[in-house]
Structure formats: C-alpha cells, structure tokens
Image (spheres, rainbow, N blue to C red):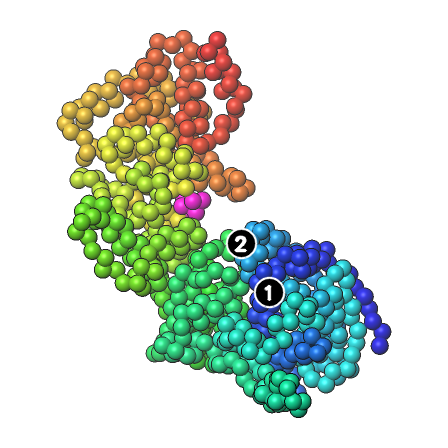
Amino acid sequence: MSTQTHSFQAEVAQLLHLVTHSLYSNSEIFLRELVSNASDACDKLRFEALNNASLYGEQPNLEVRIHFDKDAKTLTITDTGIGMSQQEAIDHLGTIAKSGTKAFMDQLSGDQKQDSQLIGQFGVGFYSGFIVADKIVVDSRRAGLAEGEAVRWSSGGTGDFEVQAITRAERGTSITLHLREEHSEFLNAWKLKQLIAKYSDHISLPILMEKEEWKDSEKEGEPGSMVKTGEWETVNKASALWTRAKKDVSDEQYKEFYKAISNDYEDPLAWSHNRVEGNSEYTQLLYIPAKAPFDLYQRDKHAGVKLYVKRVFIMDDADSLLPQYLRFVKGVIDSADLPLNVSRELLQESRDVRLIREGSVKRVLSMLEDLARHDKHEASANAEADADAETVTDVVSDEDKAKEGKYTQFYAQFGAVLKEGLGEDMGNKERIAKLLRFASTSSDTPSVSLADYKARMKEGQEAIYYITADTLAAAKNSPQLEVFKKKGIEVLLMTDRIDEWALNYLSHFDETPLQSVAKGAVDLSTLQDEEEKKAAEEAAEAFKPMLEKLKEALKDKAEDVRATSRLVDSPACLVVASDDMSMQLMRMLKQAGQPVPDSKPVLEVNPEHPLVKKLDTSANFDDLAHILFDQALLAEGGLLEDPVAYVKRVNALLA
C-alpha cells in the first residue's frame, strides 16, 4: 500500500527533540499519558454514541488492553474508543496548538523530573512515548468507517512521519512502542501493573493485561520463566473513583486522580468528596489547585469541572456548574437526574443544574473557609507563643497542621479571581468578603481580613478605610495616608487591578461602610480633640482668599480647590467626589481603550505647608499653582497632560 511522508509542524519537532533528549528522568509517566488518552478516546465514543448507537458496531465493550513482547521489545496500548481517520491522524499526531506548545516551553525550568510531569498539561501527552521508544506505530480505525479505511501512522520521533492506509478489523487505536534497550524494564508485567495502580487505578474502564503463570524449564538446570496464558485480567479497580465510599479512597489516590484530570503535576491544596441527595441527586469531587494555570485570566476560555451523567462522560469544562470566579476549581460532578444528551445550552436552562451549581459553590466556599480558619489558628498560635513561650502547648492535630499556611498559598494564586465573585455572586457576597485578604499600613503582605481590620478599629472610627494604587509602594507612600498614619488609623492597601471594580459591589462589611481615602472629604472629626477642631476651623477661615485665587488659576484642571486636614507632610493631593469614578479606575479604562467620564478632580491643599504659605507672596503664583496640581497628580500615579509645560515651569523656578 502506498505510503505518504509528512513533515512535523516546527513546534512538534522542537518538542520531540526536547522529549527525547531532556525529559528522561521520570520515564514512567509515558504510560500514564497513553492510558489516559485511551480512556478519553473511549469516553468520546460513548458520548457520540448517545445519538448514534451504531458506532459501537459489533464491539459493545469499551476497554484498554496492554500487551508487551519481550522478544520484539514492543509495548502496545490498545483501546476500543472513537479511533481516527487518516486525516485525523495527520492532524492530531503531526501538529499541536501553537499556544499550548509555547506555554509548555515557557514552563520548563531545567529540572528534568518536574518538567516531565508537565507534559500532559498542554495537550502533548502522546509524544511522551518517545521518552522510552525510538519508534512509535499507531494503527487506528475510526468508529463508523469500513475496515479498509483504517490508517497506520509511524515515526522515529525525528523530522517526519509516515502515513498509509491499512485494513483493520477492530474499531479503535493501537499504539505500539518500540522500546530502547535501556527501557526494557517496561517489558515486565509486575512493573506495568505497579504503574497502572499508581497512575490509572481511578479510570472507570477496565484495563486488561494477559495473565501469566510460572513454567518450569524443559531443560534440566535452566531456570523457569513467566509465560502468558492467553487469558486477560482486569488490573485496575475499573470503578470511577468518585463512586467509591470516602473511607475506601486513600489520600494518595485522591491526589493521583486530581493529577490525572487536571494534568497538574502538583498535589492539590484541598478536596471535597460528597454525595448529595434531595431535590437533585449528584456526586461531587472538587479540588482546589495549589498553583494557578497559565490561562487563568482568559475569561473566554471554557473552564470548569468534568460532567458525568450516571457515570457516562458528557463533557469537559462544564462551565455552567460553577461560576466564573471559581473557574480554577477542578473535579468531577456526576448527576443522576440530567438527561444523557444534555448540551451546553440545556445546562444553562436546567433546574437541576442550578441546584448543582448552588451546592457546588457552597462546598467550594466551605473548603476555603476551612483553610482560612487554619491560617487564622496558625497566626493566633504564633502570637500566643511569642507572648508566653513557656505556657503554650501543642494541641493541634496532624490534619490541622497539614492545612496551616495553605490559605495564604491559595490567596497568592487565586485571590484576585475570588474578588470577581463580589460582583458575580450576590447571594454569597458576604461569605466571599470574609475570605478576602489585603495588605495594609500594618502589613505589607495580603494577610489582613476585613474582620481583622474591624476588630482593630479605633474608638470613634466610623469606616473601614482603603486606598487603591498600581503598586504597593505607591499605595504606602500616597499623601492621602498622612493624617491616618499620624492618628494611627489602619488603611487597607489595594493593588490588584480588579479591586476598583470589585469594591463597587462592597459598600459595607458587617454594617460598617468601606470608604476610599481618595474619594470625598475625609471626616476624622470624631477622632479629633477640641483643640484640633478649633485650629482646623481657624486655618480654613483664614485660607479662604487663597483658595479663591487657586480656583481661578486652576479652573481648567480642578473641579474645586479646598483646604484639608488629611495632609501632614505634603502640600497637596487630588481626590474625587464620593460618587465619582476614581482616578485609578479612569486610568485603567483609558489604558484598555474604554470611554471615561469627562470629570475633573478636586485639589486639596495643606494650609500649614511652607510651599503653600509662600504662594500668596510669590510673583509666579499661577506657575506655582500649576506645579502644585501637577505634583499632586504625579504623587498619586497619574500622567501629566503636558509634561513639557511642567518641566518649563520647574526650570524657571530653579533658575
């Protein structure tokens, strides 16, 4: 039969070179990837057959078989799944999505063992076979095609591959690895069973291997050997892990299942396995990852858990089962009530899906609350130990210890995404608010909860104060914080780009208002003594003529000019009205090419500052007024509309 030779896509050639020359330290992962692909192929057939049962033909069983031949040095993984046509073999085995390849390359660290674990994460799992093989042959026939329309794909893992039409009686795919001499360890039944138990025990399909039995040698003095009996046995549990009782599943099995469904190489931070009965019956096994994926902020990408109906795989990334702000959650939901032919469109309209979604959100938030409580316990225990090291005794269980520090780890990876829930999930807004953490004038790390802040509020303080900025340094050094520092009032420092948007939906926490220190006139009168109040009133009265001159000089730039008591060391700062969009948000919208309202900020001036006091006697009043405004704009992270004019004014004063 005629053979066609094709060149690998450039990205595949680059990947194959990397696989064969670098990712050899953890060679056993190839079996995990190929068995996982075989299972996926069976799931795809089962799904397509929901609408076309004839695809099964005369092969009703879905299974994976593993066969090895010591003499030929070959290992073959065969599935009875969907199979491939000739064009699909060319497309699927000769090319990779460029974005996936680039992301894979970007993740590499030089640590061979860690890098090899990444290989399944970006859709390149098939090529892991070349870690152990110098040649791979793939025979496949797509379900629904005739025996004579099968295909053979073969490659030595170099620059090209060959494709030819063959005749194949069975539906599905066989992948034959011609193993290198140094990898002959995989031509061993005990070794293969060990790896299947380690990586693939959770797979709900039967994984079959030929039975072996001991046979004595016919020649006297020669050792006997294990020989195949011709019978096949199931070597995995062949039951979906989530269908088992929790007591029958070990932590290691939960972790390996997570790695298999997520293509992550790190253990999850936490998981929750539950069977829910009532108005809707379903099983959920949900995981919180330890590390954010590279595409976490691609909100248009499908993300979500795997959906099964009565143990039949329906779809990956069922995004209707969890809201967008929980798109980092991995896992499986198996419903007993949904129809087998459910589509993404039907999922959005289903009452059962709404119940599953509500229950799953509550379960995820409960997991996060549990992790947060243990972080809180750790902080309290440390503080108690510092206060009196002699009297503190360790009464923390091993399970509790294992959770310590995990919420901090979670929040560093997913905190910004969690904040999206303030605007997306009004029913759980209060629970989400309690899970948020921020840096503050008391802590450079995002470890301060709103409850922590409220517990530390000064007597007479009526609001939770915060400031938003591009960076932590800009927030910490903002002029707006000066009076708060002087009074010892804590201010939350918010530097995530999502903060401005999210806080539009969180005006109060536990009946205490949240107030931006850069919006409106800050009223700290309840924290002032009578002498301070009197001094502020007198200064404001005496400063009125100067304010009028400043308003006139800056009428094109400032909405208003007013005296303020919020400044201590700085001459001026910019604020906006309480109901206006913040300057930080306006800058973000401009950068994104979005329209912004045509509004001007308010200039607040410190009457006690030496520079301000000199204004009245200066011959360059207008220039000084504009410099005052521009410096206030620069101090809060803004960009000057006319930097050349600013430089000229400063140079003129210096000269």
Which of 637/556 is in front?
637
Which of 474/166 is in front?
166
Q: Which of marks 2 and 1 is nearer the N terminus?
A: 1
10 Å neighbourhood of mark 1: few (<14), some, or many (≥20)?
some
Element class at badge 1: loop
Q: In this view, does 361 lie above or below 250?
A: above
10 Å neighbourhood of mark 2: few (<14), some, or many (≥20)?
few
Q: Left or right of 237: which side holds 505?
A: left
Residue 72's x, y, as percent? 72, 77
Kindly identify which residue carries mark 1: 27
Residue 478's x, y, as percent? 37, 31
Residue positioned most to the right: 2
Please name the amino acid that badge 2 sits on.
Phe
Query: Magenta stretch?
Result: 496-501
Q: How far apart are marks 2 and 1 (CA)?
A: 25 Å
Which of 59/430 is in front?
59
Kindly identify which residue carries mark 2: 294
Taking the spot 67% from the left edge, 65% from the top edge, the residue there is 130
Asked whether the viewer can see residue 357, the reply is no
User: Hey, which quadrant is residue 58 in on the image?
Assistant: bottom right
Q: Is residue 202 above or below residue 556?
A: below
